[in-house]
Image: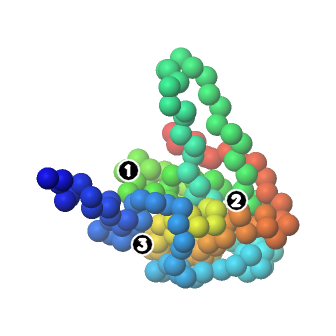
Amino acid sequence: MANPRAEEPAPLFNPEGYRIDAFVAPLPQGVPGAATVGTAEVQAMIAAGDAVLIDVLPAPPMPVGLGDNDRWLPPPHRNIPGSTWLPNVGYGSISDDLTEYLQRNLQRLTGGDHTRRLIVYCRADCWMSWNAAKRLAALGYTAVYWYPQGTTGWEEAGLPLETRKPPRRQ
């Protein structure tokens, strides 16, 4: 007889409400604690000069089969000009080390101002940005803007992207 528990799908959300599986999927209309914005609104906030853009696309994993002594360079990452790339902070469950990395960079980017505009994005249909926007609101940031179209929508609008590396994790 088959084990009925083996057929149950893995949960999509953890108890805190963050998405923990199937990160590329249709998105809801909004994020608790954040305002949803489109490309034109992001452009206006960039032009105003007081917004912090945060790209949360995960870093690509090292290919399976490479040994400790093998060299591998991840492909270049492109994002909206002026952005800071904070990879992996959009996962549903993140380590204490990654939480500290996020908080340290938020402090650096905002100067400790929890009212500073933060625009969070990834790619279209990417739950990483949804999770990250929810997480920033939970950390007490009050001007969180979620750009669900991300680099996909930016590029589709004919706007430029630039190559960026993430800040060191130390």
User: Is residue 137 placed above or below 78 in the rendered structure?
Assistant: below
Circle 1 residue = 95
Q: Position of residue 54 (x, y in %)?
A: 62, 62
Place of residue 15 in the rendered image (x, y in percent of width and height, measured from the top left): 29, 68
- Any mark on residue 138, and which? 3
Q: Badge 2, how many Cα within 10 Å: few under 14, some, many 20+? A: many
Q: Dot 1, crowdedness within 10 Å: few (<14), some or many (≥20)?
A: few
The amino acid pointed to by label 1 is Ser
Q: Residue furthest front?
A: 1
On the image, the x and y values in percent for residue 31 come to: 50, 78
Mark positioned earlier in the residue sequence (3 or 1): 1
Q: Is residue 148 left or right of residue 153?
A: left
- How far apart are the alpha carbons under marks 3 and 1? 16 Å
Q: Which mark is residue 83?
A: 2
For the residues labelled 2 and 1, the Cα–Cα distance comes to 23 Å
Residue in view at x 20 percent, y 58 percent: 5
Instruction: Identify which amino acid the numbered label 3 is placed on.
Output: Ala
Describe residue 93's horizontal placement relative to residue 29 as left or right: left
User: What residue sits 32% from the left and 69% below the top?
Assistant: 16
Rendered position, 83 above or below 29: above
